[in-house]
Amino acid sequence: MARGGLEAADGHSYGGSLTAAVMAICLMAASCGLVFGYHVGVAGGVTQMESFLNKFFPEVVSGMKSAKRDAYCMYDNQLLTAFTSSMYIGSSLSSLVASRVTMASRVTRRVGRQSVMLIGGVLFLFGSIINAGAVTVSMLIMGQMLLGFGVGFTTQAAPLYLAETSPPRWRGAFTIAYHIFVCIGSVIANMVNYLTNSMPYWGWRISLGVAAIPAIIIIVGALLVTDSPSSLVLRGEPDKARVSLQHIRGSDANIEAEFKDIVCAVEEACQNEQGAFKRLCNKRYRPYAVMMVAIPVFFQLTGMIVVFVFAPVLFRTVGFSSQKAILGSAIVNLVTLCAVITSTFVVDRYGRRSLFLIGGISMIIFQVAVSWILAEHLGKHNAVTMARSYAMGVLVLMCLYTFSLGLSWDSLKWVILSEIHPVETRSVGQAISMTIAFVLYFIQAQVFTTLLCNLKFGIFLFFAGWVLAMTAFIVVLLPETKGVPLEAMRAVWARHWYWKRFFLQDINKHDLSSTG
């Protein structure tokens, strides 16, 4: 392969290399994850701040001071969890069906990924302002819903934008960049929570209002970048697409082979007027349909809700003070960031499947260990907390679990979901996956404290059982997609021992029609 070239599946090379333009464009798209990560991180910390609880949920504060309280049930309040989960309802609604498919998918196809990210940034801004100025629980939930709408649009568009603009050789790393910014947002949220937690009365307002800053960054950035070549061709603007691709790959790059493949892929998608949703119901698209459902469902069942939303609540449960619980959450999020950065460097070297397997086995071990410590040392001998050494052990094990999660499922879900689909189902497939993910986010965020109250230490065994099942699923059914151009991805599935049967049927039909 020529130096700097990008090799396609059929043996020819795409021109181009890592240019300043593609780095800047992908950096802007990845920054959409910044606001998402910030709000996920800030919500868990705010919900255990006494200033916030005294303002909106005084009954929770009274319950925490009760001598008869159960350590596992301190935060079991459905209205409190509604503050956290309402954002995910908004995310789901912004990805729901406008006609038969999803609003986010339809908008993406009509106005492009760039405009969708701009819309998301504006929604982030308004939601942050409402949250910071809230005086009632209803205002909080309204602000969270607006934030959720922004998350739904940007989470559908940004990973696709990254996959379509990044060079195939480094596509995994560039797509994971989105999640790096999600992790950075969570780390920043914990740092802000740590500084504002001790502020009486209004510290929580600062935590919620700071989100307006990254929202403004997204709005400005979205106004400055070009749309992806695939999106422009899909909207009938091939000349602009060629200019965009040349700009991204570099002025000296030979883009003809790559541009031809993009146009061919889009033309194939447009030949059949059948809707994208109907195509996904066709047997030919069965592999994509299975993965677009399985990946988000399995990810939600890894136990990620504990890390990303309720880490401060977990650490308060095992005996940390409010300030130390936020600090513990910040440490966990820093570990997640390190894991995702590590995944960025190794995903395109060792492949997706290897990281899934390593992460899955490790997560099972650490979840079982946490469950054992909680079972043996929390709530024993009429104590509502555990010994400090064991509480620190829980923190260490959660860091190890988080590193395993960040190295595998937490990073790779974005990669797999953005690269597996052919162009004709890419937008709708991504949107459906995100809708499923956000619905499950909502359900888990709403019921987690109740599950913790009822299952107690068994909640980690529950998640460990699911990680075992999803690891087996990856071993059997997910092919390796490392380094494969998007336009050649169909061939990977056609060679898989199980999925090839769905493609062989189409080949046989084509052969029969040709001989007839």
Image (cartoon, grey):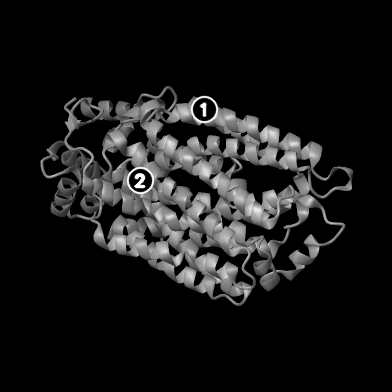
Q: Nearer the viewer, residue 229 or 93?
A: 229
Q: Is residue 286 left or right of residue 205?
A: left
Q: Amino acid at mark 2?
A: Thr
Residue 370 image offset from top left, x and y in percent: 69, 37
Q: Is residue 159 left or right of residue 132?
A: left
Q: Which residue is mark 2?
A: 425
Q: Which residue is mark 1?
A: 357
Q: Residue at x 32, y 40 (%)?
A: 422
Dot 1 or dot 2, earlier in sequence: 1
Asked if residue 101 shows in the view, the reply is no
Asked if residue 231 shows in the view, the reply is yes
Q: Amino acid at mark 1?
A: Leu
Residue 54 image offset from top left, x and y in percent: 70, 70
Disc 1 is placed on an element classified as helix
Residue 1 image offset from top left, x and y in percent: 19, 25
Please say if 59 is above or below 251: below
Tell me the crowding category of disc 1: few under 14, some 14 to 19, or many 20 or more residues within 10 angstroms, Cα based: some
Q: Nearer the viewer, mark 1 or mark 2?
A: 1
Q: CA distance from mark 1 to mark 2?
A: 28 Å
Q: Could you say which quadrant of the image residue 347 lies in?
A: top left
Q: Is residue 6 left or right of residue 366?
A: left
Disc 2 is placed on an element classified as helix
Q: Nearer the viewer, residue 513 or 254?
A: 254
Q: Is residue 504 left or right of residue 410?
A: left
Please say if 494 is above or below 205: above
Q: Could you say which quadrant of the image residue 489 lies in?
A: top left
